[in-house]
Image (cartoon, rainbow, N blue to C red):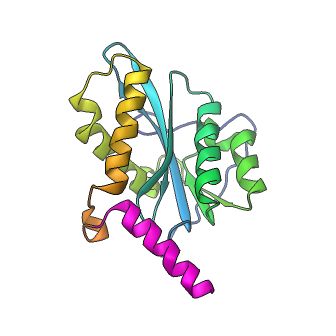
Amino acid sequence: MSEKAKPPLPARGAAIYPYLLADLAIERPNQVWAADITYLPMAHGFLYLVAILDVASRKVLAFRLSNTLTTDFCVAALEEALAKFGAPEIFNTDQGAQFTSEEWTGRLKAAGVAISMDGKGRWIDNVFIERLWWSVKYEEVYLHAYGNGTDARTALTRYFGFYNARRGHQSLQYRTPDEVYFAGLATATSHAA
């Protein structure tokens, strides 16, 4: 989980998976997805945000908010991403309890996805989603004091729509995540035909 003093703890008795992204060239949509959890300050208290990101395109595929760190909101985001975009080849997360839980890993295994996990305390292993957190917080969250979860969800839905469809990214040669994601899918489909 992002912005915590201590590294996240795995679920009790959970398997830890190796980090599969070392020296891997990530070049196409649905090759690698990543997820992480961060907290969002509110006018009173805070919420947790989980997001699922396609690493090659930086497209946010799904997100969910929760006022607790239970696994269910993470699995709900995963289910949405899988239903809308199919399955990635590899899914990378940290070793937090939500991502080492049987609910999470079982769903990935059922979809035929290779599971990758960051090394303990190695935020750099998931740097792509850490960059997303910086963007969403400094471009949206810190500019507003959401009064409640509904306000936060509405604002983040709007922001992620902007982030995916209209915000150019320097690392993508100023193209949007949607442009890169859907162009990559079209290229893969034409090569497969």
Above or below residue 21? Residue 104 is above
Q: Residue at 46% of width from left, 68% of height from top?
A: 182
Across and down, in percent, residue 143 comes to 21, 31
Q: Residue at 43% of width from left, 21% of height from top?
A: 149
Q: Which residues are magenta?
A: 175-193
Across and down, in percent, residue 82 comes to 63, 53
Across and down, in percent, residue 138 comes to 24, 39
Q: Quadrant of the C terminus?
A: bottom right
- The residue lying toward the viewer, choosing from 163 and 108, is 163
Q: How many marks?
A: 0
| Horizontal relation, residue 156 to residue 72: left or right | left
Q: Residue at 75% of width from left, 41% of height from top?
A: 102
188 magenta-colored: yes
| Horizontal relation, residue 1 to residue 85: left or right | left
| Residue 71 visible, this angle | no
| Residue 32 visible, this angle | yes
| Horizontal relation, residue 117 to residue 114: left or right | left
Q: Residue at 27% of width from left, 37% of height from top?
A: 140
Across and down, in percent, residue 128 comes to 40, 56
185 magenta-colored: yes
- The residue lying toward the viewer, choosing from 77 and 9, is 77
Above or below residue 127? Residue 56 is below
**Residue at the top extreme?**
44
Q: Main secondary structure of the magenta part?
A: helix
**Residue at the left extreme?**
143
| Horizontal relation, residue 7 to residue 109: left or right | left
Above or below residue 22? Residue 44 is above
- The residue lying toward the viewer, choosing from 98 and 4, is 98
